[in-house]
Image: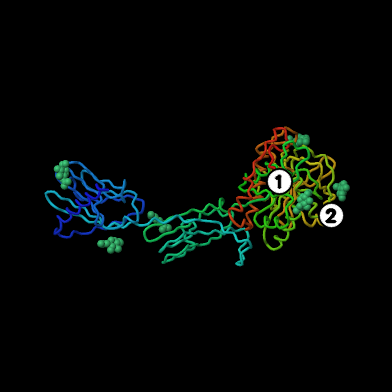
Amino acid sequence: MLHGFVLFGLCFWRLVGVIGVEADEIESLSVMEGDSVTLPTGVSKIQEDDLIMWMSGNYCIAKLNISSQVITETHDIFRDRLKLDDQTGSLTITNIRTTDSGLYKAQMIGQQVSKKTFNVTVIARLPVPVITSYCPQNPSPSGSSPSRCVLMCSVLNLGHVTLSWYKGNSLLSSISVSDLSISLSLPLEVEYQDKNSYSCVINNPFSNQTQHLDITQLCQPCSGILAQENIKDDPHAQGSSYIAASYVKHLESAGARVVPIHINRTEEEYEKLFNAINGLLLPGGNVDIEKSQFTRAARIFYELAIKANDASDYFPIWGTCQGFQQLTVLTSNKNLLTLTDTKAVALPLTFSPGAQNSRLFKKFPKDVLQSLSEENITSNFHSWSLSIQNYSSNAKLKRFYRVLTTNTDGKKEFISTMEAYQYPFYAVQWHPEKSPFEWIEKDGMVHTLSAIKATFYTAHFFVSEAMKNHHQFSSQSEEEKALIYNYQPVFKGMNSIFLQNYYFD
Ligand SMILES: *[C@@H]1O[C@H](CO)[C@@H](O)[C@H](O)[C@H]1NC(C)=O
Ligand SMILES: *[C@@H]1O[C@H](CO)[C@@H](O)[C@H](O)[C@H]1NC(C)=O
Ligand SMILES: *[C@@H]1O[C@H](CO)[C@@H](O)[C@H](O)[C@H]1NC(C)=O
Ligand SMILES: *[C@@H]1O[C@H](CO)[C@@H](O)[C@H](O)[C@H]1NC(C)=O
Ligand SMILES: *[C@@H]1O[C@H](CO)[C@@H](O)[C@H](O)[C@H]1NC(C)=O
Ligand SMILES: *[C@@H]1O[C@H](CO)[C@@H](O)[C@H](O)[C@H]1NC(C)=O
């Protein structure tokens, strides 16, 4: 401290010594916060006995005595941020702060006395704007179609800035404020599948900051997978219910985040969850599809989904194997299934006329559709099936579902894939999730590339359907609490029909 004080005094004395020198010109400099600026003395080489002092306001901040080669920094505010060139005496300020703005004077005292003055303006760096997806619970009154994701670009607490959305290089919209506001936000609506590059830019006359929009990351859905009662005698079982991890991986592989739906919850809880997730997957398994807690929860979600879709809130349901069977019971209010010889067999799908143009299949690549129809790549692990005969003779089922593919066990023809006419409900009797994610050695298991490609396109289709509604959790912490990441799957061994299970309750 004493050291600093002494030097301060010395500067002051020198300053007095140069009073009377005619006022020099002020050189103005603008520099961006965080950058470095060099203030040149304009001298190419200072003389032996020169003394150079730098003043900020009235304070001496650095001095250089050429004959003693001593460079002294004398002000705490600039600690480790000043550099004096020992040849020219030029001052460099690194990592400059907005509070460093002001006048800087160089005093060069030697044979001649000269001085230089700089007016340094440090321009505050703009914060990078933040893009969040803002998805209203209900379709907006403006009638925006549900396949759109609503995004919000915001910055906090700035004056004199403009916030703009760009699509490529063209300006879409912008908003300006001239006073210090709490926050500034600008919305943008995009299609989920939009491939354009969007960016949000904040700028003032001096600088700008850009945030690029990653639609796939921001507009990703959460899909619920319904748990079911544990299989009897499962030696690994914990709690009372489970979800096979292959279903979780299946949806994750196409970019969804998974929320487990627990059985044995109240209708209110299910309704709340329904409004937070973007789709429902009913997995395969082995429960009573008329009386189980699995069925109870599936029915509640099914009815909520019917109601939502009737009100133009697009909520998809996917049923796999037991999930397929469950959907037939929920739609017809009857169990119309019949026993087939379809346990552990891989089959090619027989497409119904026009089925390749169905919602489910129409965006599948041609080679995947060809593999599905020609190769034995769909894994069947079921004893019960919906025969064409029972489907055709049940008015409810016939009116509700369109048959996309069929198969036969040699005796009975059964439905292997269907989609609802009026609702985004899809059902497969086969197991798309098994090819990449289950490894039990059994007939009917297929791990070929074409099978894995077919798996991916089924998952991708369902996840893209789930992107079409605006359901969301009431807060990020609610969402975090609900996600499957809060649970650890249990490895059940290579010989288990499900390699890993998540257990609950
Ligand atoms: C500069 O350093 C020399 C040599 O150490 C010393 O004699 C001289 O007094 C110093 N000048 C000032 C102004 O401090
Ligand atoms: C220094 O620059 C600022 C901003 O550019 C200006 O407002 C101020 O008047 C200038 N100071 C002097 C002494 O020229
Ligand atoms: C942002 O600033 C850079 C220079 O720093 C400039 O080239 C660019 O055009 C600016 N962009 C916008 C949108 O103002
Ligand atoms: C949960 O399960 C228990 C026991 O099976 C049953 O008594 C209870 O009614 C169930 N609760 C709900 C909400 O279904
Ligand atoms: C039709 O459904 C009944 C149950 O309602 C079942 O017993 C029967 O086997 C089924 N028949 C065929 C051909 O699927
Ligand atoms: C498909 O499996 C059946 C028997 O299940 C077999 O007869 C047929 O050759 C297989 N087809 C292919 C392309 O492997």
Could you say where residue 461 lies in the image, as x and y percent from the top left? 66, 49
Q: Nearer the viewer, mark 2 or mark 1?
A: 1
Using the rendered image of the protein, determine whether residue 441 is visible from the camera's viewpoint: yes
Could you say where residue 67 lies in the image, as x and y percent from the top left? 16, 42
Q: Amino acid at mark 1?
A: Asp
Could you say where residue 115 lies in the image, as x and y percent from the top left? 18, 54
Secondary structure, mark 1, is loop
Could you say where residue 406 lies in the image, as x and y percent from the top left? 78, 46
> Which residue position holds label 1?
505
Q: Is residue 102 above or below residue 3?
A: below
**Between 428 and 449, which is closer to the camera in this rendering?**
428
> Which residue position holds label 2?
394
Q: Amino acid at mark 2?
A: Asn
Q: In the image, 209: left or right of 47?
A: right
Using the rendered image of the protein, determine whether residue 295 is visible from the camera's viewpoint: no
Label 2 with label 1: CB-CB less than 8 Å: no
Q: Quick one: label 1, few (<14), some, or many (20+) residues within 10 Å? A: few
**Between 320 and 290, which is closer to the camera in this rendering?**
290
Q: Residue furthest front?
A: 2
Q: Is residue 359 above or below residue 141?
A: above
Q: Label for residue 270?
A: none
The span from disc 2 to disc 1 (Cα, nearest Å) is: 38 Å
Quadrant for ligand 6 reads top right
Mark 2 or mark 1: which comes first in sequence? Answer: 2
Q: Residue furthest left?
A: 111
Secondary structure, mark 2, is loop
Q: Indicate if the residue with disc 1 has its beta carbon within 8 Å of ligand 4.
A: no
Q: Quick one: label 2, few (<14), some, or many (20+) residues within 10 Å? A: few
Q: Quadrant of residue 502?
A: top right
Q: Indicate if the residue with disc 2 has its beta carbon within 8 Å of ligand 5.
A: no
